[in-house]
Amino acid sequence: MTVNVDSWVKASIKIKAHIDAGGRAFFDGKEVEVVIIGGVRKVALPICKFLFTFDELKQLGAKVDVITLKTLAVQGAEGRWRENIQQRMERDIPSNVYIANARSIEYAISKGRVPPSVKWLGRRGDKMTETYDTIDEVIDAMATDKWRTEFRRGGRAKRRT
């Protein structure tokens, strides 16, 4: 399947279009709308009236991050957790930033105690940041690649020898 478009549109797509691994589309650094028509995800670009599928954008030279099984799982989770995601969006909480001490807070509330202050944690793949007091600190740590390297518990904890 080949896409016949104007050479200017093709060049613009090659230079300015980007699809990230989460299935979001960007044009000239701004997120553009992704619609689902007949079960096929299509992108409406501001440079033309034609809707492009992800495959067509890839053929035209757009930068496309690898869509892995993990991102497909995330898309499935988005369907199941749409309400939770909507609440996070309303509160301006990024999808990869979490409350690090959520269980401690829930436990304190269930026992009628004063809950501890909220601590935030960022995750990307199998990496995680330290805990911070604000979401902005977490985002800054993720942007500067400040990931944890030492763990007390879990599979990556240092074992006594």
Image (cartoon, rainbow, N blue to C red):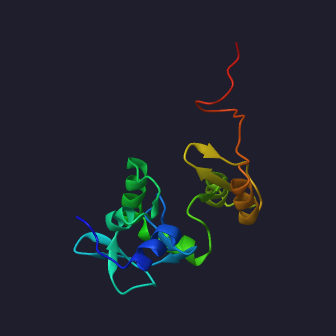
Residue under the point 39% across and 85% down: 48
Q: Is residue 135 left or right of residue 155?
A: right
Q: Is residue 119 visible?
A: no
Query: Outermost residue, top direction?
Result: 161
Residue under the point 54% across and 47% down: 125
Q: Is residue 84 left or right of residue 160?
A: left
Residue under the point 71% across and 49% down: 145
Residue 129 position in % (x across, y down): 69, 49
Image: 55 above or below 10: above
Residue 22 position in % (x across, y down): 46, 60
Image: 72 above or below 45: above
- Quarter holding residue 137: bottom right
Q: Is residue 100 left or right of residue 47?
A: right
Residue under the point 26% across and 66% down: 2
Query: Outermost residue, bottom direction?
Result: 49
Q: Nearer the viewer, residue 140 or 5?
A: 5
Number of numbered markers: 0
Q: Quadrant of the N terminus?
A: bottom left
